[in-house]
Amino acid sequence: MVELINILKALSDETRYQLVNLLLKHDLCVGALATRLNISESAVSQHLKILRDAGIVKGDKRGYYTHYYVDQKVLKEAADQVIQLSRVIPVNQNCHYDCPKKDNLFSCSKHRHEGGESK
């Protein structure tokens, strides 16, 4: 679960999302990524570190340069976990027991009523 959270956090930044999108199509070095995204090489490196720490991106040293690529297995496993989450079936549609009360009223938007009785 922690791994999924870290992956989602890493992908939540638009620039990192764009980096992943580019790297799914081509293995690229920092310079090529910086040119394509019109940002500095140091900014690319900082974003790549976050993506590497989340396990999404890996690098292969090729001569002087490191070419980065997406570990598609990690990305697919995260996608599968999100799909499983979307398939969770609610146990109880009636949330009276979990809704906070204020002035003897349930305060959730689904149950605007007094006590436990629906109006």
Image (spheres, rainbow, N blue to C red):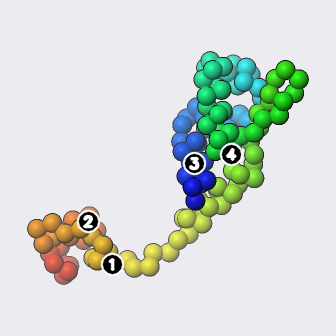
| Sooner in the amino-acid sequence: mark 1 or mark 3 | 3
Mark 1 neighbour density, 10 Å: few (under 14) some (14–19) many (20 or more): few
Q: CA distance from mark 4 to mark 2?
A: 38 Å
Q: Name which quarter of the figure residue 30 lies in.
A: top right
The residue at which mark 1 appears reads as 94
Disc 2 crowd, CA 10 A, few/some/many (<14, 14-19, 20+): some
Q: Position of residue 99 (x, y in %)?
A: 27, 70
Kind of residue sitting beneath label 2: Cys
Q: How far is the residue under mark 1 from the one under mark 2?
A: 11 Å
Q: Position of residue 85 (x, y in %)?
A: 55, 65
Residue under label 4: 55
Residue under label 3:
6
Sequence-wise, which precedes: disc 4 or disc 2? 4
Q: Which mark is residue 108?
A: 2
Q: Which circle marks residue 23 in the picture?
A: none
Q: Earlier in the sequence, mark 4 or mark 3?
A: 3
Whether residue 24 is visible here, answered yes or no, is no
Identify the residue at horizontal 64%, vertical 56% (top origin): 79
- Quick one: 111 or 8, which is closer to the camera? 8
Q: Are marks 4 and 3 in contact (CB under 8 Å)?
A: yes
Q: CA–CA distance between discs 1 and 3?
A: 32 Å
What's the residue type where badge 1 is placed? Asn
